[in-house]
Amino acid sequence: MPTLGLLEDDPLQRTMLQRILQQAHYEVHPFTTIQEMINALQRQSFDLFLLDWSLPDGTALEVIQQIRQRLGWQTPIVIQSIHDTEAQIVHALEQGANDYITKPIRVAELTARLYAQMRTSVTKEQEQELILPAGYYFNEAEHTFNYQHQSVRLTPIEYRLLIFLTRHSNELVSRQTLLDEVWLRPTSTDSRTVDTTIARIRNKLNELPHHPFNIGTVRGFGYRLSLVESSLPPHPPHRT
């Protein structure tokens, strides 16, 4: 379950947002002042931030700077504010925010924007530390998996799922973990969706003359992806 840092000084707004975000399957950590959130950054990590721009002890700019210094640029930051001028929005984005929402908050828009930010963040994170046999590679811009000059096109969710399983190759991954980490658990998703998506990925990979993946089903639990030995580059000769 993604961890979200919520900065909002108005108690009614904070309570409402916390309820909405929890229903959207976020683990919400609420804060009322800039200093409270900065202190929290020293002892815990977050997957996403939703920050009110104007607060009693300053603006969210100070928090954005601290987040970028401590967590880098991978963690999404979404600003909410009553200010809707172009100059204000551009300023927030230039200072390191990923998105900007004007109040009053529209629930469906808020959850969709947060989900979009998390989806992008997860994809970038999952693409790190991928180890593939020579000749195979992912193309994030086109959502394809490629072998030399041949490729298969995947949907965005198929692409993220295959990357996640590749990053966790040889690990037993439950359906629930896939819902949490790839789909981010939208309420309309169940385990059968995972199964049908896996089936589509298998069929598409089989369009290639060779591919390095064996996606095995563990009945009643989930899946394990392993790299097919015949697709791996040869081992270097043993030296004596």
Image (cartoon, rainbow, N blue to C red):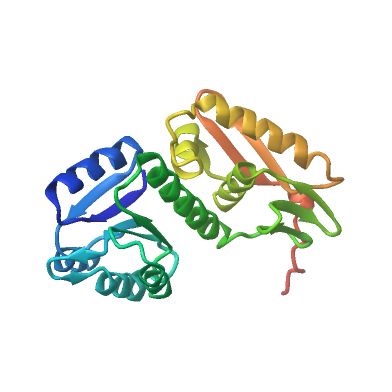
Of residues 177 and 233, the one nearer the viewer is 177
Q: Quadrant of the C terminus?
A: bottom right
Give the residue drawn at x 34%, y 76%: 69
In the rendered structure, the answer to whether residue 155 lies left or right of residue 185 reads right
Side (left or right) of 121 relative to 107? right
Viewer-proximal residue among 9 and 143 = 9
Across and down, in percent, residue 44 comes to 25, 60
Q: Residue at x 71, y 55 (%)?
A: 142
Which quadrant does the N terminus fall into? top left
Would residue 91 be found to the left or right of residue 172 on screen? left
Identity of the residue furthest to the front in this view: 85
Tell me where residue 60 sits by quadrant: bottom left
Where is residue 83 drawn, in percent x and y?
A: 30, 63
Task: Identify which residue is drawn at 58% across, 59% down.
Answer: 127
Q: Quadrant of residue 223?
A: top right
In the displayed structure, 28 sits above or below 67; it is above
Provide residue 62's location: percent of width, then percent of height.
25, 74
Number of labels in the image equals 0
Q: Please name the residue shown 64% across and 60% down the image.
A: 131
Q: Position of residue 86 (x, y in %)?
A: 41, 68
In the picture provided, is 59 more to the left or to the right than 179?
A: left
- 110 versus 221 height, above or below: below
Of residues 232 and 18, the one drawn nearer to the viewer in this rendering: 18
Viewer-proximal residue among 53 and 217: 53
124, above or below 184, in the image: below
